Image (cartoon, rainbow, N blue to C red):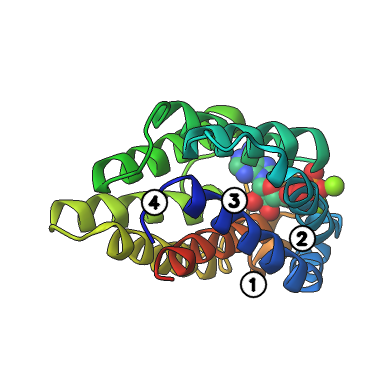
Amino acid sequence: MNLNATWAKAWIRSSAQVMSEHRVELIDLDREIGDGDHGENMDRGFQAVLHKLDDLPPEAGPGDVFKFVATTLISTVGGAAGPLYGTAFLKGAVAISGTIELDGPALVAFLRAARDGIVLRGKAESGDKTMVDAWTPAVDAAEAALAGGADDRAILSAAADAAEAGALATEPLIARKGRASYLGERAIGHRDPGAQSSALLLRAAAATATT
Ligand code: ADP
Ligand code: MG
Ligand code: MG
């Protein structure tokens, strides 16, 4: 599938399904090092997006879809993740504003702007055991794939692979941001829930692009 508004909507529909399928898993991860609501927050947010997706005007481009996702996530997800994902989609949308179909460079610009939005909002650095630890390797891998001549599907799958590896690599870390930072060394051995949901989101993007 070309990376147009139809893809953007398909990605978001798929994300809604994935978040509801992984709701309990994300709750369990957040119960270990947070307050146990991450799966609930993400499921609620994406269900809200899902139910309003068809209200978008037919001429909406992918940037309009992501802007709408941003505002809906900000108003429905709550907690730390709502504003972080909301800012990611908002900054990503601005980076591709007016684009009808994303090519490789536009796709990478979208991913980079989304990651930069999360960092701007949450001020976390790599290694702080947050969703940034999924997004930054994903952006690095996407940039490397683009530089190596990969097409948009290969860029997305490289990003998703790197995000999954990044989420896994949060397990041995001590958290320096968010609720998990209150736990000190007790956070060691547990995967960051937001890094995990970010990897799920990027895998859904890659999977949707290959249909
Ligand atoms: P809350 O902690 O308010 O209950 P969630 O459980 O929905 O919110 O989301 C928790 C996730 O948010 C964490 O696993 C982490 O990935 C992410 N997070 C928290 N604070 C930050 C931050 N400052 N920067 C980046 N990500 C963060
Ligand atoms: Mg939580
Ligand atoms: Mg909470």
**Mark sitting earlier along the chain (2/3):** 2
- Residue 106 location (% of width, % of height): 31, 39
- Label 3 environment density (alpha carbons within 10 Å; few <14, some 14–19, many ≥20): many
Mark 3 residue element: loop
What residue is disc 3 on?
130
Q: Closer to the camera, 144 or 169?
A: 144
What residue is disc 1 on?
189
Give the Cα distance between marks 3 and 4: 28 Å
Mark 4 residue element: loop
Q: What residue type is labelled 3?
A: Thr
Residue drawn at point x = 63 percent, y = 67 percent: 191
Which quadrant of the view contains residue 22? bottom right
Q: Which amino acid does label 4 sit on?
A: Leu
Query: Which numbered disc, 1 or 4, marks the residue closer to the eye?
Result: 4
Give the Cα distance between marks 4 and 2: 36 Å
Query: Which numbered disc, 4 or 2, marks the residue closer to the eye?
Result: 4
